[in-house]
């Protein structure tokens, strides 16, 4: 049963015009692919896609790419795109560990990390999407003014991420332990996890970081 379910997801993904099947072939050519010079913003670990689809709807002058590791999850985003009529969004099924194979230096303007998996065991810290190891990867694809924006309700992961930003010598532009009651909440688009956890009363933390002085 499980295998049949996954096979169905993979077929749906393979047939979707929104899923880029061979993203490595577009490294350095994403602007050409979108046919414009609009900024390219990606969400790593987009899950079922609520955030990135709404961002693309609201901002047609920005190109968005959602990245998700698992077909069984990505297919839920594909299904949400049935009535989507814009050309500024694509999805990729891949492990973000290989992100430098897909995007070139200076190609990405913003990286969104939303409710990333916490990997609570110390020995798995390098797998956290805000670890210095991942920040190095992001460094190799972001524009000089590019930002990483990270939201989570997991305070331990958030504090770890603040430390990693400092260790990597990135610059913390701003941060809050309660996004929804802060000055930064205007225009905030909620993710699936954000809706779920804020409904339980968990405050949402958010940080914005970049590498170069303005
Ligand atoms: N961003 C969504 C949200 O806020 O509702 C989903 C959050 S969910 C906790 C984290 C998602 O990130 C999962 O769907 C997981 O499969 C994906 N993910 C985790 N590590 C990843 C990686 N290395 N590359 C791509 N996706 C990853």
Image: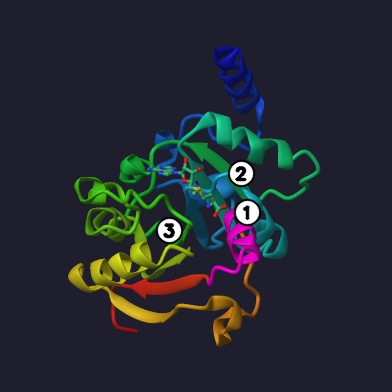
- Front tag of 1 and 3: 1
In this view, 166 is above or below 16: below
Are the two marked residues, 1 and 2, in contact with CB atoms closer than 8 angstroms? yes
Cβ of mark 1 under 8 Å from ligand 1: the answer is: yes
Cα distance between the residues tagged 3 and 2: 22 Å
Seen in the image, is 169 located left or right of residue 182?
Answer: left
Please name the residue shown 53% across and 30% down the image.
Answer: 71
- The magenta region covers 192-203
Q: Regarding mark 3 in the picture, which secondary structure is present there?
A: strand
Circle 1 crowding by C-alpha within 10 Å: few under 14, some 14–19, many from 20 = some
- Label ID, residue 192: 1
For the residues marked 1 and 3, what is the alpha-carbon distance in whole angstroms? Answer: 24 Å
**Residue closer to the observer: 176 or 69:** 176
Regarding residue 143, the answer to whether it shows in the image is: no
Query: Tag 1, which secondary structure?
Result: helix
What residue would you read off at disc 2? 48
First of labels 3, 2 by sequence position: 2
Q: Answer with the quarter of the image where residue 107 lies.
A: bottom left
Front-lying residue, 155 or 104: 155
Residue 209 inside the magenta-drawn segment = no
Quarter of the picture containing the N terminus is top right
The answer as to whether callout 2 falls within 8 Å of ligand 1 is yes
- Residue furthest toward the front? 200
């Amino acid at each position: 049963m499980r295998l049949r379910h996954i096979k169905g997801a993979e077929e749906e993904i393979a047939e979707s015009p929104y899923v880029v099947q061979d993203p490595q072939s577009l490294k350095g050519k994403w602007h050409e692919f979108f046919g414009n010079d609009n900024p390219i913003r990606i969400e790593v670990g987009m899950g079922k896609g609520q955030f990135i689809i709404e961002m693309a709807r609201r901002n047609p002058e920005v190109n968005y790419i959602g990245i998700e590791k698992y077909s069984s999850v990505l297919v839920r985003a594909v299904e949400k795109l049935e009535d989507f009529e814009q050309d500024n969004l694509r999805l990729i099924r891949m492990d973000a560990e290989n992100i430098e194979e897909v995007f070139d230096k200076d190609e990405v303007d913003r990286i969104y990390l939303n409710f990333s998996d916490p990997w609570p065991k110390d020995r798995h810290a390098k797998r956290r999407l805000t670890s210095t190891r991942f920040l190095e990867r992001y460094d190799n694809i972001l524009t000089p003014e590019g930002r990483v924006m990270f939201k989570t309700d997991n305070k331990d992961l958030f504090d770890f991420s603040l430390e990693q930003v400092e260790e990597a010598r990135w610059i913390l532009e701003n941060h809050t332990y309660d996004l929804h009651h802060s000055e930064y909440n205007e225009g905030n688009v909620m993710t699936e996890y954000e809706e779920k956890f804020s409904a339980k009363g968990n405050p949402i933390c958010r940080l914005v970081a970049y590498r170069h002085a303005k």
